[in-house]
Image (tube, grey):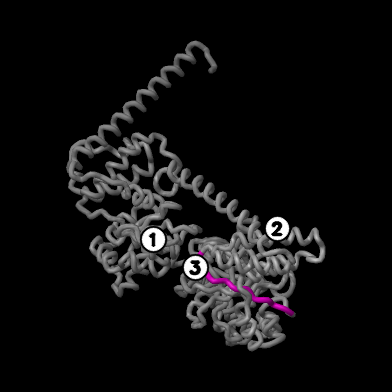
């Protein structure tokens, strides 16, 4: 084991899972001794994410993820096991033991070191003759040198190998550059710089690490923004540009923008809570990331068709997390950067203060599509507007907006209210059916979220789960005779869990979600936590263990006999010359 067992056990004791999870998830609904909240790993409206203070584990009954406090940090922060351990050690004020010999951890650390060196190289290019074009561009966009320093903005020279040669001179290899997405391989086998003739924005995570880059083309051309590819440390759907700065803001809300220039311009003007979603539409993962730092979001997307469409989609995603959403009406400018340049920071501040509630925004968007003096358009407007009213969660909201829609269309309020109620019943019915289908899917799938597929032999798998559960709950059973071999397990995932538990117990080591976390994958850990939720009568644990073992052997013998019969039948067919 890379970390001493006593260190891992102390680490988990000093990082109570309820306290750690509560910094990411609102836990309130109680069921027995457990706490419930909305799962941070998938979108849901009904809390199915459970945290057990007694067992110090979490488990989502919707997506199946589960584990201990280290697994939770690994999942939520996208960290390796050693990195999650270091994260929790810092939280608890514990000194780390001697450096571990973890290959992936070393690779990640090396990649972060490379990204930092590359960011420094790009920034230094602004002071060279080659970087003059980038400096001219920033002056044109009115980005100050102080803003460039604050964001670490730099320039990728318009050459094929400037970065490559600079990084190689610092001891980094072409393979490391390729894995970090900083170079691409050519047809001849050589490499060339990924980013060329672009204004470079380092993407920095909330821990201050340079995890990737976003390059903005100078002038016109496509793609306007080029982002680093997915790497060991970078996943653009799970990160937000400038969140490392915005998280420190005292304003109480996040401003969600489309581009890096918009964000830099907003920060420069004093609006230090602006972030951008790295050239992609807002993802559920990014929304959950935002929800860790605020419960209010102001959408400040471009004032064009694509921006309006993206805002509508973002509203739907943010709503699911119970975030209060407002939308800016950028009149007379295509984006926040242009608005500030034309009208100044104070005008933008007033715009923020008067930003529309997301319901008003969506209703206005519907209204602008139709000519309400036309009967045909009026009918189409009423259909779309009542659908919007029907989807509002609160009865008071539905009544207020039903009145407004009726007034706009010049029809009795009861017409809109009744139609909205009918549509709402259909929506609720559809949602219930979808939830029932999902629950059926979850129930039929094995524990762990269904990602492992159905058990090939349910009877044997149930017994295999029982053996694992008993050894975990009563480690002294490891001395019982006749324990099965891993090969006796019909399900590979259960075999891996059993093997990890059995081997640790035989070495005299403790077994819990913390100590197993380094050996088991996230999926296997979720499966273990899920099967631990099932009851087990420990008063007759030895008898139960041998019953489970006998069932496993019985099913294996039956499977072996079936295989022998099939082989004999095939041999007979071949001998007789049968084809089917």
Which is more toward the observer, 218 or 511? 511
Image vertical order of residue 16 relative to residue 272, above or below: above
- The residue at 58%/63% (across/down) is 392
Residue 141, quarter of the rendered image: bottom right
Residue with the mark numbered 3: 289
Task: Determine whether, in the image, residue 438 is placed left or right of residue 540.
Answer: right
How many numbered marks are there?
Answer: 3
Give the label, 2 or 1, closer to the camera: 2
Residue with the mark numbered 2: 383
Residue with the mark numbered 1: 36
Q: Does residue 330 belong to the magenta stretch?
A: yes
Distance between the alpha carbons at the discs numbered 2 and 1? 37 Å
Task: Determine whether, in the image, residue 580 is placed left or right of residue 450.
Answer: right
Lower sequence index among marks 2 and 3: 3
Pinpoint residue 149: horizontal percent, then vertical percent.
56, 84
Give the label, 2 or 3, closer to the camera: 2
Q: Which residues are magenta?
A: 321-331
Distance between the alpha carbons at the discs numbered 3 and 1? 19 Å
Label 3 residue SS: helix
Pinpoint residue 469: horizontal percent, then vertical percent.
28, 46
Image vertical order of residue 190 relative to residue 116, above or below: above
Give the label, 3 or 1, closer to the camera: 1
Lower sequence index among marks 2 and 1: 1
Lower sequence index among marks 3 and 1: 1
Q: Does residue 125 belong to the magenta stretch?
A: no
Residue 107 in sight from this viewpoint? no
Label 1 residue SS: strand
Task: Determine whether, in the image, residue 235 is placed left or right of residue 484.
Answer: right
């Amino acid at each position: 084991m890379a970390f001493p067992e006593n260190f891992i056990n102390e680490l988990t004791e000093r990082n109570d899972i309820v306290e750690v999870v509560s910094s990411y998830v609102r836990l309130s609904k109680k069921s027995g001794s457990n706490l419930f909240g909305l799962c941070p790993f998938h979108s849901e409206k009904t809390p199915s994410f459970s945290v057990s203070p007694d067992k110090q584990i979490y488990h989502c009954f919707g997506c199946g993820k589960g584990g201990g406090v280290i697994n939770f940090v690994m999942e939520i922060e996208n960290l390796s096991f050693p990195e999650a351990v270091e994260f929790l050690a810092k939280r608890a004020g514990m000194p780390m033991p001697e450096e571990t010999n973890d290959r992936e951890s070393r690779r990640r650390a090396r990649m972060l070191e490379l990204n930092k060196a590359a960011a420094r190289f790009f920034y230094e290019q602004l002071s060279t003759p080659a970087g003059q074009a980038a400096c001219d561009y920033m002056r044109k966009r009115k980005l100050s040198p102080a803003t460039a320093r604050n964001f670490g903005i730099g320039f990728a020279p318009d050459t094929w190998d400037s970065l490559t040669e600079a990084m190689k001179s610092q001891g980094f290899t072409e393979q490391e550059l390729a894995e970090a997405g900083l170079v691409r391989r050519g047809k001849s086998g050589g490499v060339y710089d990924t980013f060329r003739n672009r204004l470079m924005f380092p993407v920095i995570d909330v821990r201050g690490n340079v995890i990737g880059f976003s390059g903005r083309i100078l002038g016109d051309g496509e793609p306007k923004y080029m982002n680093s590819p997915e790497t060991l440390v970078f996943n653009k759907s799970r990160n937000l540009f400038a969140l490392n700065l915005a998280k420190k803001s005292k304003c109480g809300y996040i401003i969600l923008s489309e581009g890096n220039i918009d964000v830099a311009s907003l920060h420069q003007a004093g609006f230090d809570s602006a972030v951008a979603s790295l050239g992609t539409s807002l993802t559920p993962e990014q929304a959950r990331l935002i929800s860790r730092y605020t419960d209010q979001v102001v959408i400040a997307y471009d004032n064009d068709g694509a921006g309006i469409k993206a805002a509508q989609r973002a509203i739907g995603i943010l709503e699911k997390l119970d975030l209060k959403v407002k939308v800016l009406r950028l009149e007379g400018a295509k984006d926040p950067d242009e608005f500030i340049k034309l009208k100044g920071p104070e005008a933008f501040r007033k715009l923020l203060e008067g930003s529309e509630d997301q319901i008003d925004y969506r209703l206005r968007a519907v209204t602008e599509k139709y000519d309400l003096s036309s009967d045909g358009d009026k009918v189409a407007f009423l259909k779309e507007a009542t659908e919007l009213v029907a989807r509002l969660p609160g009865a008071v909201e539905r009544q207020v907006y039903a009145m407004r829609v009726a007034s706009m269309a010049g029809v009795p309020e009861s017409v809109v209210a009744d139609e909205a109620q009918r549509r709402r019943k259909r929506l609720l019915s559809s949602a219930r059916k979808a939830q029932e289908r999902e629950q059926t899917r979850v129930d039929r799938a094995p524990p762990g979220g269904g990602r492992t597929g159905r058990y090939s032999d349910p009877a044997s798998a149930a017994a295999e789960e029982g053996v694992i559960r008993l050894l975990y709950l009563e480690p002294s059973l490891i001395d019982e005779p006749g324990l099965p071999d891993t090969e006796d397990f019909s399900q590979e995932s259960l075999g891996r869990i059993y093997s990890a538990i059995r081997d640790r117990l035989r070495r005299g080591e403790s077994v819990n979600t913390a100590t197993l976390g380094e050996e088991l994958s996230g999926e296997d850990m979720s499966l273990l936590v899920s099967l631990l939720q099932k009851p087990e009568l420990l008063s007759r644990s030895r008898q139960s263990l041998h019953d489970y073992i006998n069932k496993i052997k019985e099913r294996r013998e039956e499977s072996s006999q079936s295989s022998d019969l099939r082989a004999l039948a095939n041999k007979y067919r071949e001998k007789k010359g049968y084809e089917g």
